[in-house]
Image (cartoon, rainbow, N blue to C red):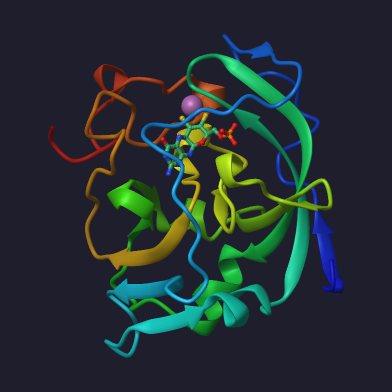
């Protein structure tokens, strides 16, 4: 892999299946729209919005993938009710992005942006959780195109739609705003242990008005 492993973290693996989920054999491909083509010379990872210094931070592919590499063992829970347990994700911790391109003190949420305008919103605390990782690898192998190469987000404690494949950047936000699926009927928070699948289940304070 060419990267030293800085530390391994447990993510949320080992906790079993959240309510209503069933185990899936293998690793299905689930997403909306086409698989984007990776163009290394045009690819960049952009951190923008409510940054601490008001600026924009950009890494090209070589720079981004040279950031410290960690592994996280975490389960993947799709809201359509299948789960994949015990994957070892390798990549760059979201915390590293927060350290190198810090948000303004007023930032409360992030929008993670992917190719074709796909997005998902997260509370800053979920983004900053120890297991949240911009994965480049799974089980020691580079991600394939359909699974998000070159970079996908893994947020172990939330449903998998909260982890965009083909990530291109992060927007720091001073108020919550809904991402792609959060605008289209899925829950704004998406905690699988509380079965927060659909927006009609949201309580006061769970998300912005629809
Ligand atoms: N860019 C993008 N990322 C996405 C999606 C998508 O539609 N577009 N779907 C999400 C959903 S609903 C799931 S379950 C996982 C599936 O990841 P996999 O195809 O690697 O199993 O990707 C997530 N990331
Ligand atoms: Mo999903």
Location of residue 84 by image quarter? top right
Decide which of 2, 153 is in the foreground and name it: 2
Residue most extreme to the left:
209
* Residue 91 point in image, percent of width and height: 69, 62
Which residue: 34% across, 77% down? 105
Decide if residue 92 is on the left or right side of residue 79.
Answer: right
Does 65 sit above or below residue 36? Answer: below
Decide if residue 97 is on the left or right side of residue 58.
Answer: right
**Res. 130 in view:** no
Query: In the rendered image, which quarter contains the C terminus?
Result: top left
Which residue: 24% across, 51% down? 176
Decide which of 174, 31 is in the foreground and name it: 31
Which residue: 41% across, 21% down? 197
Query: In the rendered image, which quarter contains the N terminus?
Result: bottom right
Decide which of 203, 186 is in the foreground and name it: 186
**Res. 152 in view:** yes
Does 131 sit above or below residue 178? Answer: below
Location of residue 201 by image quarter? top left
The mark total stands at 0
């Amino acid at each position: 892999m060419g990267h030293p492993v800085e530390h391994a973290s447990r993510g949320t693996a080992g906790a079993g299946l959240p309510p209503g989920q069933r185990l899936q054999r293998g690793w299905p491909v689930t997403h909306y729209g086409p698989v984007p083509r990776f163009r290394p010379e045009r690819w960049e990872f952009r951190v923008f919005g409510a940054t601490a210094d008001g600026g924009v931070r950009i890494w090209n592919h070589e720079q981004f993938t040279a950031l410290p590499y960690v592994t996280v063992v975490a389960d993947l829970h799709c809201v359509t009710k299948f789960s994949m347990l015990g994957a070892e994700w390798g990549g760059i911790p979201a915390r590293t992005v927060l350290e190198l391109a810090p948000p303004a003190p007023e930032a409360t949420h992030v929008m993670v942006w992917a190719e074709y305008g796909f997005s998902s919103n997260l509370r800053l605390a979920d983004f900053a959780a120890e297991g949240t990782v911009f994965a480049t690898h799974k089980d020691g192998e580079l991600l394939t195109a359909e699974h998000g190469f070159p970079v996908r987000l893994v947020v172990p404690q939330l449903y998998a739609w909260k982890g965009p494949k083909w990530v291109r950047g992060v927007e720091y936000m001073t108020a919550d705003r809904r991402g792609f699926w959060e605008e289209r009927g899925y829950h704004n928070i998406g905690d699988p242990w509380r079965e927060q699948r659909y927006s009609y289940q949201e309580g006061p304070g769970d998300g912005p008005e629809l």
